[in-house]
C-alpha cells in the first residue's frame, strides 16, 4: 500500500531545540574549512548506498532494483546550486523528520555544550555526534532534500529548510529510490560550483569511496578501496600506485603489509614502509602517515592515534567498521576502542617485521639501517610492545664479521653454558672498540660482546634492562662477575702486599678522580682501565653529556683497575719508592690514557706537558 498523503500534505515543523542550537552556530559562524560539508554529504550518501547494498543482499526486493549504486554531483554556476544524488537506501517521511529534524545521538548535549563553549567554533566538533548533515548549512542558504525509501511501497518526500528554526515536509512526485540534496549556495559560497574545486575536494576526502562519484558527468574517483579487496586479486603495480597516491611520492615502498582481522576487532589494513627516512636528513619530524577509514569512508587523514608515535614513518590505510564515523581528533586520543585498535595493528606490524627479519635478513638489515632509530624510540617510549621490539634490535658484535649484524636472540643462542648476562660496549667504530682495554677480559674468555655505535644505544639497552631474563650489561661497568681463567696469561702478578700498598698510594695520588683503585681480574694486555660503578651512567652516556657540556669532566663514580701482571705497573711499584715525584707523573698519564680509552675527554694541556717530561726521561 502506498502511503497516503492526505492530511500529511505540506507541513511546517520546528526543529528540535538541540538542532536549532547546532544550526544557529553553523549558520551564523564563519568557518575556514567549510569544504568539509561535502565530505559529510558524500559519506552520508556512501552510507546509504552501503545499507542499500546490504538490504538488497538480505531482502528479496528493493525499490528500483535496476538503479546502479552511485553518487552524482551536479554543479550549476548559473543557478548557484550544488546537487548531490545517491541511489541508496533513501528516507521515508518519518525518517526525514527523525534524521534531519532531531539529534538522536546521546552525545548531543555534550556537543552543544562544547559548541557553545568553543569561542573559536571548532569545526571538528560539528562533525561529531551524528550532525554532519547540518554542516551543509555553512554553505547553503536553503537545502532541499528529495528522498524515496528503498521499501517497495514507499512514496517520495521533499524536505526543505533554510536552517533557521523550522523545515517543511511534504509529498514529492516522480522520484526514484535514493536521496537528492539540492544546496542553494550562499553568496559567499559560489566557489562550490567550480568543477575543479569540487573534484579536488572529493579527491582529498573521498577518493576511496567504493561507489562511483561523478561531477557534471565526469567520473572522479578512479582509485578503488584496494585494501578491502582480496590480496590475490591485487597486482604489485596496483599496490605501488596506491602507495604513491597516499604517500604522495614517486618511489616504490620498501615493505608492504596487507592484512584483515575479524576478531577481536574488524580491521582491514594496508601499511607501507617507505624507501627513505627523511627525518634522518634533518627534514624535521614526520607527520603520522596512516589514514583512518570506516567502511571506506575517510574519517581522518594522517590519524594520530591509530598507530603509536614511533611508527610515524609508516604510510597507509586502516579501515575499521568498529570506529564511529564521526569520531573527532580529541575523542580518538582517549578512546579505549582506538587504543585497542592501535595495540592490535602495532602487534601485527611488529610480527610482520620479525617475519621479514627471519626470512630475508639482508633486506631487513637495510630496513634497520634506515628505520632502526624508530624501533629504538619505541623501546624507550612504549612498554606495551617491548618484547617484540627487542627482537627487532640488530647490532654488530665480536662474533660477527665486520658489517654484519646480529640479534639478541642469536646472541643468546650462542651463549656458552654458565653465561648469564648479555654484554655490550659502545664505541664509535668496531676498530676503536677492539683496540681498547675493555674487550680484553672477554676476548680471553671467548665471551661475545655486542658493539653499539650510536650514543642512543646504551640508553636503549639500559632501558630494556634484560632480554629473556638475561641481564644486559655494559662491559665498562665495575661490578662484573666473569668466570676465572684456567691458565693465567703470561707474567706472575705482584704479590698481594705490594698490590695493596700500590693501590693505596694510587688512590692517594689520584684523589677524587677515582673512588677506588684495585687489582684487575680482567685485564690482559693493558696496564689499567677505568670502570663505572653506576650501571646506567655508562661511558657512552657520559660522552653524550660531555658533548653538551665541553667543560665537564668525567662523571659518576669510577674504579681504576690495574693489571698487576703488566710490566709498567710492576715497575711503577719500584719507581714509586725511588722517585715518587716522577712516579706521580706516570700515574697521571696512566689515568688520562684510561680516560681516553673510555672515550672520555681528558685535558689535552696536561697530557702534552706530562708527555714531554716522560719523554725527556726516556731519552736521557
Ligand atoms: P550521521 O551520518 O553521523 O548519522 P548526519 O547528520 O550526517 O549524521 O546524518 C543524519 C542521518 O540522516 C543519517 O544517520 C541518516 O540516517 C540520514 N541521512 C543523511 N543523509 C542521507 C542520505 N543521503 N540517504 C539516506 N539517509 C541519509
Ligand atoms: Mg553523516
Image: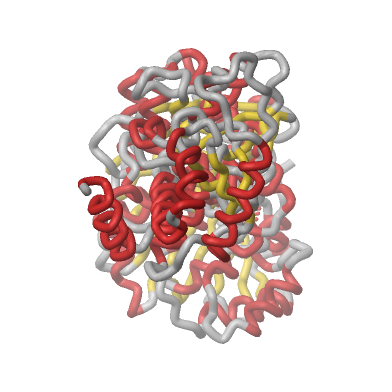
38 sits left or right of 189 in the view: right
Q: As drawn, which residue projects farthest toward the right? A: 106
Q: Above or below — where is 389 with respect to 530? A: above
Image x and y of residue 283, in percent: 30, 55
Q: Give the mark count.
A: 0
**Which residue is at the front of the view, 532 or 149?**
532
Residue 53 shows up from this direction? no
**Which residue is at the front of the view, 311 or 467?**
467
Look at 55% across and 54% down and name the residue there.
506
Look at 67% across and 77% down and name the residue there.
114
603 sits left or right of 309 in the view: left
Look at 62% across and 73% down and name the residue there.
167
Q: Quarter-wise, where is residue 482 in the image?
A: top right
Q: Quarter-wise, where is residue 10 in the image?
A: bottom right
Figure colour scheme? secondary structure
Q: As drawn, which residue projects farthest toward the front? A: 578
Image x and y of residue 453, in percent: 41, 39
Residue 109 shows up from this direction? yes
Image x and y of residue 541, in percent: 51, 53
Ligand 1 is located in which of the four quadrants?
bottom right
Image x and y of residue 115, in percent: 63, 79
**Which residue is at the front of the view, 240 or 446?**
446
- Which image quadrant: the N terminus? top right
Look at 67% across and 37% down and name the residue there.
496
286 sits left or right of 467 in the view: left
Amino acid at each position: 500500500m502506498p502511503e497516503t498523503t492526505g492530511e500529511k500534505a505540506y507541513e511546517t515543523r520546528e526543529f528540535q531545540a538541540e538542532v536549532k542550537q547546532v544550526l544557529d552556530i553553523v549558520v551564523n559562524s564563519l568557518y575556514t574549512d567549510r569544504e568539509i560539508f561535502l565530505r559529510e554529504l558524500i559519506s552520508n550518501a556512501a552510507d546509504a548506498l552501503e545499507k542499500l547494498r546490504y538490504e538488497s543482499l538480505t531482502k528479496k526486493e528493493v525499490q528500483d532494483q535496476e538503479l546502479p549504486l552511485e553518487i552524482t554531483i551536479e554543479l550549476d554556476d548559473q543557478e548557484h546550486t550544488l546537487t548531490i544524488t545517491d541511489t541508496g537506501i533513501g528516507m521515508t517521511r518519518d525518517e526525514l523528520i527523525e534524521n534531519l529534524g532531531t539529534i538522536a545521538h546521546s552525545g548531543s548535549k555534550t556537543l552543544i555544550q562544547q559548541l557553545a563553549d568553543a569561542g573559536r567554533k571548532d569545526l571538528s566538533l560539528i562533525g561529531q555526534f551524528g550532525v554532519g548533515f547540518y554542516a551543509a548549512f555553512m554553505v547553503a542558504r536553503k537545502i532541499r532534500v528529495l528522498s524515496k525509501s528503498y521499501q517497495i511501497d514507499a512514496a517520495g518526500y521533499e524536505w526543505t529548510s533554510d536552517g533557521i528554526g523550522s523545515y517543511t515536509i511534504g509529498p514529492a512526485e516522480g522520484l526514484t529510490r535514493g536521496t537528492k540534496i539540492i544546496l542553494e549556495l550562499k553568496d559567499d559560497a559560489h566557489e562550490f560550483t567550480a568543477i575543479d574545486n569540487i573534484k579536488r575536494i572529493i579527491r582529498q576526502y573521498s577518493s576511496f569511496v567504493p561507489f562511483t562519484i561523478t561531477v557534471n558527468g565526469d567520473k572522479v574517483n578512479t582509485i578503488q578501496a584496494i585494501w578491502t579487496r582480496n590480496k590475490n586479486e591485487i597486482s604489485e603495480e596496483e599496490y605501488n600506485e596506491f602507495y604513491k597516491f597516499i604517500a604522495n611520492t614517486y618511489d616504490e615502498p620498501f615493505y608492504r603489509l596487507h592484512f584483515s582481522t575479524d576478531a577481536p576487532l574488524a580491521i582491514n589494513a594496508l601499511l607501507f614502509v617507505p624507501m627513505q627516512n627523511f627525518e634522518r636528513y634533518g627534514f624535521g619530524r614526520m607527520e603520522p602517515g596512516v589514514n583512518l577509514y570506516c567502511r571506506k569512508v575517510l574519517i581522518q587523514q594522517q590519524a594520530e592515534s591509530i598507530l603509536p608515535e614511533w611508527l610515524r614513518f609508516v604510510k597507509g590505510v586502516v579501515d575499521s567498521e568498529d570506529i564511529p564515523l564521526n569520531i573527532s581528533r580529541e575523542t580518538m586520543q582517549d578512546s579505549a576502542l582506538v587504543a585497542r585498535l592501535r595495540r592490535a595493528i602495532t602487534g601485527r606490524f611488529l610480527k610482520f617485521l620479525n617475519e621479514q627479519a627471519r626470512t630475508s635478513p639482508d633486506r631487513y638489515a637495510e630496513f634497520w639501517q634506515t628505520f632502526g632509530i624508530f624501533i629504538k624510540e619505541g623501546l624507550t617510549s612504549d612498554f606495551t610492545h617491548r618484547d617484540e621490539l627487542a627482537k627487532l634490535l640488530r647490532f654488530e658484535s665480536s662474533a660477527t664479521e665486520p658489517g654484519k649484524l646480529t640479534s639478541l636472540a642469536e646472541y643468546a643462542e650462542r651463549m656458552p653454558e654458565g653465561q648469564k648476562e648479555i654484554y655490550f660496549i659502545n664505541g664509535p667504530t668496531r676498530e676503536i672498540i677492539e683496540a681498547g682495554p675493555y674487550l680484553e677480559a672477554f676476548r680471553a674468555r671467548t665471551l661475545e660482546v655486542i658493539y653499539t655505535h650510536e650514543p642512543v644505544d646504551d640508553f636503549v639497552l639500559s632501558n630494556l634492562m634484560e632480554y629473556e631474563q638475561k641481564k644486559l650489561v655494559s662491559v665498562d661497568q665495575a661490578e662484573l662477575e666473569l668466570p676465572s681463567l684456567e691458565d693465567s696469561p703470561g707474567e706472575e702478578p705482584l704479590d698481594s702486599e705490594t698490590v695493596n700498598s700500590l693501590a693505596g698510594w694510587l688512590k692517594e695520588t689520584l684523589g677524587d678522580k677515582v673512588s677506588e683503585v684495585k687489582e684487575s681480574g680482567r685485564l690482559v694486555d693493558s696496564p689499567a682501565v677505568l670502570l663505572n660503578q653506576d650501571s646506567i651512567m655508562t661511558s657512552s652516556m657520559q660522552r653524550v653529556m660531555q658533548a653538551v657540556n665541553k667543560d665537564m669532566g668525567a662523571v659518576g663514580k669510577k674504579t681504576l683497575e690495574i693489571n698487576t701482571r703488566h710490566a709498567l705497573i710492576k715497575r711503577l711499584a719500584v719507581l714509586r719508592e725511588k722517585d715518587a715525584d716522577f712516579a706521580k707523573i706516570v700515574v697521571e698519564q696512566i689515568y688520562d690514557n684510561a680516560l681516553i680509552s673510555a672515550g672520555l675527554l681528558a685535558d689535552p694541556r696536561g697530557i702534552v706537558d706530562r708527555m714531554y717530561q716522560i719523554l725527556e726521561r726516556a731519552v736521557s
